[in-house]
Image (cartoon, rainbow, N blue to C red):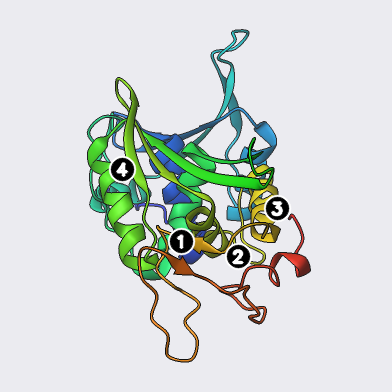
Amino acid sequence: MPQKRKKLNIEGTNLWYLVGLITSDGNLSKDGRHVDITAKDRYFLRTITAKLGLANKIGIKNKDTYKEAHRLQISNKNFYDFLLSIGLRQNKSLILGALHVPNRYFMDFLRGVIDGDGCIRNWIHPTNRREQWSLRIYSGSEKFISWLSDEIAGLLEVFGKIYNSRENLWVLKYGKMAAREIIRRCYYKNCFGLKRKIKLARDCCRSYSGWTQSKTVVDCYRRDGETGKRTGLKIPRPQGLVGSIPSPGTFWAHSSVG
């Protein structure tokens, strides 16, 4: 009698966050069963096992070297086959393309990608002395990074720039207002994620200095029948209410880092 397949009880926002993390920092083994997630932060992997109800142990990769990292391995044939069905592959780094991610959970998926292979950065502009922010997402696959850019543009009406940083490394970059619009949608109240990125997301959403127009964000704060344009857009200081999809400025003032 064939062995009954074990079901992995992960669904909804947690499932698609995990998929995003595997897309960026994960690996599908050749045995058709095991999925690895690698991170330098052991505590982060422990929070994943606790959040998702996994009993898996956390191992060490490249021990006693400068590349030492921690590894969470999930052994589940059903889950492995599910990842294949949405477009993930073995040795995916350079060949990954479009994935089948439901629009409803795309922000959770994107948060997982950012936590794995994203960079939220801020600095002070040397000329105007105003705080600047950017969001960068890295990938070895041009097809994947192009698909991700198109999905973000279609769902959020936010536009970034793709460039080749070096051989086999593609970067999708968003400037301050575009970055904030993505971040505020991905890192919503009480979302699960990497603590360090959640704190940066909170700080970004609290920052307003000099943020009055954008060439990369279509007006998502339409008022009084006004329609935003891609260039020369003026966005008023938002006065929205706290909600599951927060308005900048009100949301992070009432939420914790996690």
Q: What's the mark number on residue 145?
A: 4
Q: What's the mark number on residue 107?
A: 1
- At label 3, the amino acid type is Asp
Label 3: how many Cα within 10 Å (few below 14, some 14–19, many 20+): some
The local secondary structure at tag 1 comes to helix
Residue 82 in view, yes or no: no
| Nearest the eye: 75 or 254 | 254
Looking at the image, tell me whether mark 4 or mark 1 is earlier in sequence order: 1
| Alpha carbons under labels 4 and 3: distance apart | 26 Å
Determine which quarter of the picture holds residue 67: top right
> In the visual, does 107 lie left or right of 148?
right
Q: Are the two marked residues, 1 and 2, in contact with CB atoms closer than 8 angstroms? A: yes
Residue underneath mark 3: 203
Residue 151 in view, yes or no: yes
Determine which quarter of the picture holds residue 205: bottom right
| Alpha carbons under labels 4 and 1: distance apart | 16 Å
Front: mark 1 or 3: 3
Q: Are the two marked residues, 2 and 3, in contact with CB atoms closer than 8 angstroms? A: no
Question: Which quadrant of the rendered structure holds the C terminus?
Answer: bottom right
- At label 4, the amino acid type is Ile
- Marks counted in the figure total 4
| Alpha carbons under labels 1 and 2: distance apart | 9 Å
Label 1: how many Cα within 10 Å (few below 14, some 14–19, many 20+): many
Residue underneath mark 2: 188
- At label 1, the amino acid type is Met
